[in-house]
């Protein structure tokens, strides 16, 4: 077993204390840096940093970043949800470590949507019907996963399907 325990800290985001969601940082009792490329392979991380080592992925509807000595989880409902996710992640970390000889480590993040490719799929009228000042801003929000084709009222069914198809290749939620 690589990861035996952790101490968690639950808090509201400092940028806006009125947010209802909570954040969690778990400080790990062991350094798990060696398992990160294996965990990246198993869980399909969308971002992998080599120095210092860290992997970020989406799971359980959250963005989770695992560092050598800590784990950060955003937008939690409550402490119970943090406990469930941390225990799941502890099992995943230890499972990846135990099976590391069977896993091809990955030191790369998953491909990401390209803003200009998304922009090419839009009408580029800057109509503002989506609530954004330009189609470029809308495209960047789509790339981040904050908006979808359904949020652009100008797109017809075919264009909406084209954007959905493009974005589908980047979906890796566990």
Image (cartoon, helix red, strand yellow):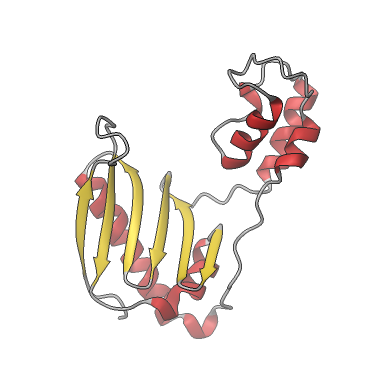
**In terms of image quadrants, where is residue 33?**
bottom left
**Up-down relation of residue 129 to residue 81 (above or below):** above
Nearest the eye: 159 or 107: 107
**Up-down relation of residue 115 to residue 174 (above or below):** above
Q: Residue at x 62, y 18 (%)?
A: 130
The percent coordinates of residue 17 (x first, y second) are 25, 34
**Up-down relation of residue 123 to residue 66 (above or below):** above
User: From the viewer's perspective, is 82 left or right of 167?
Assistant: left
How many marks overall?
Answer: 0
The percent coordinates of residue 15 (x first, y second) are 32, 38
Q: Residue at x 63, y 21 (%)?
A: 133
Q: Residue at x 37, y 73 (%)?
A: 68
**In terms of image quadrants, where is residue 158?**
top right
**Up-down relation of residue 150 to residue 38 (above or below):** above
The percent coordinates of residue 109 (x first, y second) are 59, 62
Quarter holding the N terminus? bottom left
The percent coordinates of residue 83 (x first, y second) are 23, 54
User: From the viewer's perspective, is 74 left or right of 114?
Assistant: left
**In terms of image quadrants, where is residue 131?**
top right
Nearest the eye: 56 or 157: 56
């Amino acid at each position: 077993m690589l990861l035996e325990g952790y101490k968690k800290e639950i808090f509201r985001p400092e940028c806006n204390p009125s947010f209802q969601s909570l954040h969690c940082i778990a400080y790990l009792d062991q350094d798990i840096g060696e398992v990160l490329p294996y965990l990246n392979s198993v869980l399909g991380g969308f971002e992998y940093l080599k120095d210092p080592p860290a992997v970020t992925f989406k799971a359980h509807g959250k963005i989770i970043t695992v560092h050598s000595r800590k784990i950060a989880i955003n937008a939690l409902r409550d402490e119970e949800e943090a406990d469930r996710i941390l225990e799941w992640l502890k099992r995943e970390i230890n499972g990846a470590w135990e099976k590391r000889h069977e896993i091809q480590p990955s030191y790369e993040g998953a491909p990401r949507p390209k803003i200009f490719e998304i922009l090419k799929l839009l009408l580029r009228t800057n109509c503002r019907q989506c609530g954004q000042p330009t189609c470029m801003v809308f495209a960047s929000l789509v790339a981040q996963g904050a908006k979808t084709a359904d949020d652009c009222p100008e797109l017809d069914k075919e264009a909406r399907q084209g954007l959905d198809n493009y974005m589908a290749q980047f979906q890796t939620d566990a």
